[in-house]
Image (spheres, helix red, strand yellow):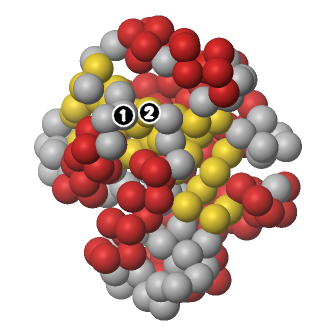
């Protein structure tokens, strides 16, 4: 079910929280384009999740995933409330981001900041990074598999969808197909 109010999502999750003790909230959103409003919302939302004693599940990408992981690492230094599913092993993922920076798709700073974040997270808690050891390349198939893994490991999904992002829409549909609640914030950002 689509939900447009975070407090309502938490309210609908209360019985599951009583049963499980900790809930895992998937985070999905745009890696291509964000703005301060999106970043602030992601950071505030993840702060509320960690303050509840719950955890986040994400895909380790730029922008929305990066913001969510950054806040979670600051509020949960042991990183036991963070699960990051990668589409490939970390070394291949880092090489992919460096290649994309070399192509000018992203900046070198973006690539290196993300790689540092993931390596630091793995150092703090090796179990927080879940690498796909089957995939040998980063492509749409690997990304969509990763989206499925994030949804599978989540009790509910929080989606920060910018410009009808196809990857975010994929995660939303997978969560809805599994009968999971989806908190959705939609944004339009001009090019």
Frontmost residue, 148 versus 136: 148
Q: Report crowding for label 1: few under 14, some 14 to 19, many 20 or more residues within 10 A (C-alpha).
A: some
Residue at the image point whose x is 61% and y is 45% from the top: 69
Q: Quadrant of residue 116?
A: bottom right
Which residue is at the far bottom?
A: 136
Q: Quadrant of residue 21?
A: top right
Q: Which mark is residue 32?
A: none
Disc 2 from disc 1: Cα separation:
5 Å
- Identify the element where label 2 is drawn: strand
User: Is the residue 124 above or below the residue 179 in the image?
Assistant: below
Q: Is residue 59 visible?
A: yes
Q: Position of residue 48 (x, y in %)?
A: 59, 19
The residue that appears at 20% across and 56% down in the rendered structure is 166
Residue 112 visible in the displayed image: no
The quarter of the image holding the N terminus is top left
Indicate which disc residue 156 carries. Answer: 2
**Earlier along the polypeptide chain: callout 2 or callout 1?**
2
Q: Residue 82 is drawn in which quadrant? A: top right
Q: Position of residue 113 (x, y in %)?
A: 61, 61
- Rendered location of residue 126, percent (x, y): 80, 63
Where is mark 1, residue-wise? 180
Task: Say whether marks 2 and 1 touch (CB < 8 Å).
Answer: yes
**Rendered residue at 84%/55% (across/down):** 124
Dot 2 crowding, Cα within 10 Å, few <14, some 14–19, many 20+: many
Front-lying residue, 78 or 96: 78
Residue drawn 85% across the image and 43% down it: 78
């Amino acid at each position: 079910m689509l939900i447009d109010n975070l407090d309502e999502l938490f309210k609908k999750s209360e019985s599951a929280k009583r049963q499980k003790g900790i809930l895992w909230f998937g985070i999905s959103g745009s890696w291509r384009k964000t703005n301060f409003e999106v970043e602030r919302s992601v950071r505030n939302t993840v702060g509320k999740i960690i303050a509840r004693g719950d955890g986040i599940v994400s895909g380790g990408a730029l922008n929305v995933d990066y913001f969510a992981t950054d806040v979670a690492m600051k509020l949960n230094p042991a990183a036991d409330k963070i699960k990051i599913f990668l589409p490939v092993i970390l070394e291949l993922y880092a090489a992919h981001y460096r290649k994309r920076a070399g192509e000018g798709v992203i900046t070198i700073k973006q690539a290196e900041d993300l790689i540092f974040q993931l390596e630091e997270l793995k150092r703090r808690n090796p179990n927080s990074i879940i690498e796909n050891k089957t995939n040998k390349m980063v492509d749409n198939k690997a990304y969509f598999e990763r989206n499925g893994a994030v949804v599978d490991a989540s009790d509910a999904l929080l989606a920060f969808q910018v410009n009808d992002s196809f990857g975010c829409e994929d995660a939303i549909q997978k969560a809805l197909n599994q009968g999971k609640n989806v908190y959705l914030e939609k944004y339009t950002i001009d090019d």
